[in-house]
Amino acid sequence: MMGIIEKFKFIKPGEVRTRFAPSPTGFLHIGSARTALFNYLFAKKNKGSFILRIEDTDKERSKPEFEQDIIENLKWIGIEWDEDLYKQSEREDIYTKYLKKLLEKDTAYYCFCSEEELEDQKQEQMSRGLPARYNQKCAQLSAEEVKKNLDAEKKAVMRFRTPAQKIVFNDLVRGKVEFDSSLMGDVVIAKDLTTPLYNFAVVVDDFEMKISHVIRGEDLLPNTPIQILLQKALGFSQPEYAHLPLILGSDKSKLSKRHGAVSVAEYKKQGYLSETIINFLAFLGWNPGTEREIFSLASLIKEFSMERVQKGAAVFNIKRLDFLNGFYIRQKSPDKLTELCIPYLVQEGLLEPVFKTESYPPAYGGMSISQKYRVVETKEEVSFDYLKKVVAIYQERLKKLSEIIELTDLFFKDKLHYDKKLLKWKDMSDEEIKNVLDKLTEVLSEIKDADWRKKNLENILMLEAEKIGDRGKILWPLRTALTGKKASAGPFEIAEILGKGKTLKRIKQAGGLIE
Ligand code: GLU
C-alpha cells in the first residue's frame, strides 16, 4: 500500500486542496451540502483538488447508512471528489503517532478524573462565578503515577496543555478573528491512543492531506483556535480558513426540522431536481453580484469567488427553491421529464412496470423508454409515449416531480370520485348541467376516432359553446367530468389523451351523479 507521504508527494506547492469532512451521524443535511459545494467550487475554480473525508471517530453515533446517504446524495447533486474517499476510522495509526508525539513533548497528558469529579469541579467554579474549565488536577502527575493508573486500567482521557494566548487569524469570509485561549482550559483531544476526538483528528488529517483551505460552517468557528494551537504544538503549517454563514429558516431562526425538510434526500424525494439543489445551495451565502439567477455547476465553478461569500446569515427561501425547480422542469425534454415522473406514479401504486421475463430485473434498476407499464386499477397496458403525453400537459405548471401524482392520477383511474357540485358552473341548475352533458355526448359521439384530436375537439365544442353564449357552461362541466378536479389542464387536451371511449364514459358517469 502506498504510504500517506508518498501519496501526496506529487502535490504542487501552492496547490489548492479543500475537503468536505462530514460526520456520518445523520443524513446529508442541506447545510452540509452547501459546505461541500463551496469547497468543491473553490477547489475547481483554482484548478485544485477536493477531497471527501468521512469523520467517523464517534463510533456510537456514526452509522454506515448515513455514510451511504452522504455519498449517494453528493453524487446525485453532481459533486465528485478527487482521490479515494478517506475514513478516519481507517487512520488510527496516524493519530496514534501524533498523540504519542504530544505526550513525549509533554504538551499532552493523561487525565484520570472521573465524570463526577469533573462535574463537581464545574459546579464549584460556577458557584464562584468563574468560567468552567478543567482545573488541571492531573496536569502534574508524575510518570510513575500515570503508569500506575494506566496499568490499573483506570479510565483516562488525553488533554492538551492549552497554552494561554491570544489567537488571531484572518478568515477569508469574516476577516480578522480573535480568540483568547486562556478561557478554554486543557481540552480533551483523545479518549486513548487510538481514539482521537474531533479537534485532534481534524488537525492531523488536514495536515497529512495537505489541505490548503478549510471551508466550513460558522458553527465550527469556536473550534478553530484550539485547532490552530494544536497545529503549532505539532509543528504543522496553518491552512487558510473560511467560515460560511449560518443558514436560517424563513423566520430567521437556525434552520431545523421545524422548517420542513432538511436533508438532501428529502428534497430529492419530493421531486426537486439536482440542478435546482445546486443552484439553490450556491446562493445560500454567495451571490454573483449580478441579476443572473440560473447557474449550472460548470458556470458556478467559473463565477464562484470567496470574496462574494457573505458574512451575514443566509436565509432559506423555499419560494426560490420552487421557482428554480419549475424553471429546470420546463427545461427538460418531454422524454426526460417523463422518465423522472414515472417512478412517482409507480411508487404511488397507480402504475406498475411490466417486465418481460428475459429482461427482469431491468438494467440499472431504472425505467427505460422501451419499458411498458400497466395501470394498476384497470390493468390496461400503456406505452411510454402515452405517459409522455400525460406528463407533457403538466410540464408548464409542475413545481415538484411529486406533484405529478395529484395532477395526473385521473388518467390512471377507472372511476372518479367527486361531489356533483363540482360540475356546476356559476348558477347552473342541475337540469342545465344534465342538458349540457347530454349535448356533449351527442356531439362527441359523432366524432370519428381518427379525428379525435385536441384541435378538432376544440373547434367543434367551441361552436356549441358559442350557441349557448357562456363558454363556461359547456367547458366547465366537461373539464370537471373528465378530471373530477377544480383545477387541471384544459378539457380538450385531456379528452384527446383519454380517448373517445373514456371521455364518453366519464361524461356518462357525471350524468349519473345528477339524477
Ligand atoms: N466533521 C465535522 C462535522 O461534521 C466537520 C469538520 C470540519 O469541517 O472541520 O461537523
Image: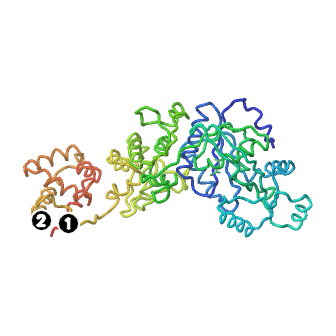
Horizontal arrangement in the rendering, residue 151 relative to residue 282 (left or right): right
State how far apart marks 2 and 1 are (Cα). 9 Å
| Label disc, if present, on residue 502 of the rendered structure | none
Q: Which residue is mark 2?
A: 430
Q: Secondary structure at mark 1?
A: helix
Q: Quadrant of the C terminus?
A: bottom left
Q: Which one is in front, 247 or 83?
A: 247
- The numbered mark, 2 or 1, whose residue comes first in the sequence reads 1
Say what amino acid the circle numbered 2 marks. Answer: Asp
Q: Position of residue 225 (x, y in %)?
A: 68, 46
Name the residue located 20 percent from the left edge and 66 percent from the top edge: 420
CA neighbours of label 2 inside 10 A, class few (<14), some (14 to 19), many (20+): some
Say what amino acid the circle numbered 1 marks. Answer: Lys
Q: Secondary structure at mark 2?
A: helix
Q: Position of residue 181 (x, y in %)?
A: 69, 48
Q: Which residue is mark 1?
A: 420
Horizontal arrangement in the rendering, residue 372 relative to residue 298 (left or right): left
Name the residue located 48 percent from the left edge and 36 percent from the top edge: 296
